[in-house]
Image (cartoon, rainbow, N blue to C red):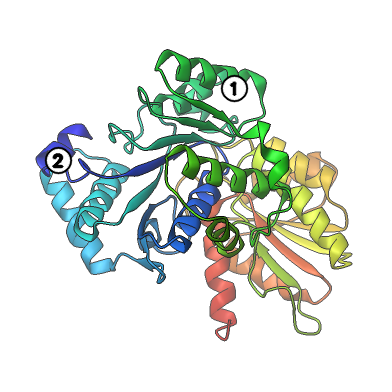
């Protein structure tokens, strides 16, 4: 990646970056950070992954318009990157193209989300960010990052740079100690979000869930640690407006037509994320007096889907389950997912496609439809639903 950027003239050399890593919560934290900075009057470059429906979602400028990079221009920049380094991976090409775009647009700040891990991530080519942020750390991508929480935490902590403040969200003492020790070894200020978390409980947030309060606190503390001055009003409005598709996204809003269920998509793709999701769903169904839920689940082969299904079946009531095939190379066979549901004592409808599962969701007897298990499945169902409801 360094060779690629050098061949491109190091477009990232003078970026002012807030660098965010973590297993869960980094996308929401990135969007909240960008929203606050935008509300404060700054222009923000936002780089996130993966995308839901369109790869251009990954590279955006927030200046009151929230516009994605144009597809033709993105293709052009990706070709420049490929020409500079023919062995570059897909994510390296994405990252290099994003850097080229941001060097053209020259935003005041760039909020940069890692892809996988931290230490060896393509985004870890920023030598001196303003602040590094580590959100929740859990067991995910274990083949690449290690099979213990300690190894994964060390990989995430790899984004910490000498003398650069570190904002840590995790309440896990073992993870926190690894991050704190790495920060100390590199001469960094360490900001523990857990110590100030309770003071953010009254914040008005667009995104639902107890975990989003922690992400909001992390975003604000990151901005403060970076030394960026923003008003309390900008913080309040920025958090209230921050929104990330595919994170407990109620596609038909808080009010539905008679007989139509709430349609919720959430890209939770590991046990920790599913655990947080089930709590959010339970609160939502109590609030709206929903008795029956249709859950559409699809997952990648390399995920701990057995534990995810155990959590889904144990933590929520009144559910009918469907396992759906996902149009992605690493997707698990829905027949196998159905077997796991059966082992948990739950019946499961096996669907050969997301479209088949979507048609079943129109049964009329459900108060809520929940799509989860994979960001790719969430994207497929989001597209299907919005095509079907073009007025939304």
The residue beneath circle 2 is 85
Q: Is residue 106 above or below residue 152?
A: below
Nearer mark to the viewer, of 1 and 2: 1
- Mark 2 packing: few (<14 Cα in 10 Å), some, or many (20+)? some
Which image quadrant: the N terminus?
top left
Position of 339 with respect to 132 (left or right) is right
- What's the residue at 52%, 23% (across, down)? 153
- What's the residue at 60%, 48% (across, down)? 216
Res. 175 mark = 1
Q: Give the number of marks.
A: 2
Q: Does the rendering let one see residue 148?
A: no
For marks 1 and 2, the one nearer the N-term is 2
Q: Which one is in front, 164 or 12?
A: 164
Position of 294 with respect to 218 (left or right) is right
The x, y position of residue 363, in whole percent, is 77, 75
Disc 1, disc 2: CB below 8 Å? Answer: no
Res. 74 mark = none
Q: Which one is in front, 323 or 79?
A: 79
Circle 1 SS class: helix
Q: CA distance from mark 1 to mark 2?
A: 36 Å
Q: Does the rendering let one see residue 241?
A: yes
């Amino acid at each position: 990646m360094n060779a690629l950027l050098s061949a491109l003239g190091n477009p990232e050399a003078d970026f002012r970056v807030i660098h965010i890593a973590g297993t869960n919560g980094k996308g929401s934290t990135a969007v909240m950070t960008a929203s606050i900075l935008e509300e404060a009057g700054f222009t923000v470059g936002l780089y996130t992954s993966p995308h839901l429906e369109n790869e251009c979602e990954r590279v955006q400028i927030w200046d009151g318009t929230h516009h994605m990079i144009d597809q033709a221009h993105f293709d052009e920049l990706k070709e420049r990157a490929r020409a500079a380094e023919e062995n570059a991976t897909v994510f390296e090409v994405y990252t290099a193209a994003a850097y080229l775009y941001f060097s053209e647009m020259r935003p005041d700040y760039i909020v940069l989300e890692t892809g996988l891990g931290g230490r060896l991530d393509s985004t870890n080519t920023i030598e001196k960010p303003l602040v590094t942020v580590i959100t929740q750390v859990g067991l995910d991508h274990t083949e690449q990052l290690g099979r213990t929480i300690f190894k994964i935490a060390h990989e995430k902590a790899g984004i910490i740079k000498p003398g650069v403040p570190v904002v840590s969200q995790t309440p896990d003492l073992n993870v926190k100690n690894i991050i704190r020790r790495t920060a100390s070894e590199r001469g960094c200020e360490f900001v523990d979000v857990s110590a100030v978390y309770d003071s953010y409980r009254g914040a008005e947030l667009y995104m639902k869930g107890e975990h989003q309060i922690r992400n909001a606190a992390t975003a604000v503390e990151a901005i403060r640690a970076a030394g960026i001055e923003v008003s309390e009003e900008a913080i309040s409005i920025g958090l209230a407006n921050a929104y990330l598709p595919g994170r407990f996204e109620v596609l038909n809003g808080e009010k539905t037509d008679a007989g139509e269920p709430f349609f919720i998509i959430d890209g939770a793709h590991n046990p920790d994320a599913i655990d947080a999701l089930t709590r959010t769903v339970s609160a939502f169904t109590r609030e709206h007096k929903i008795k029956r839920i249709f859950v559409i689940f699809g997952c990648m082969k390399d995920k701990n889907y057995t534990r995810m299904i155990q959590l889904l079946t144990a933590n929520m009531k009144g559910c009918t389950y469907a396992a759906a095939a996902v149009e992605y190379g690493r997707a698990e066979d829905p027949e196998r997912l159905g077997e796991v549901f059966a082992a948990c004592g739950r019946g499961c409808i096996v669907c050969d496609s997301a479209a088949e599962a979507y048609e079943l969701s129109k049964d009329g007897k459900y108060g809520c439809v929940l799509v989860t298990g994979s960001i790719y499945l969430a994207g497929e169902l989001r597209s299907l639903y919005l095509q079907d409801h073009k007025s939304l």
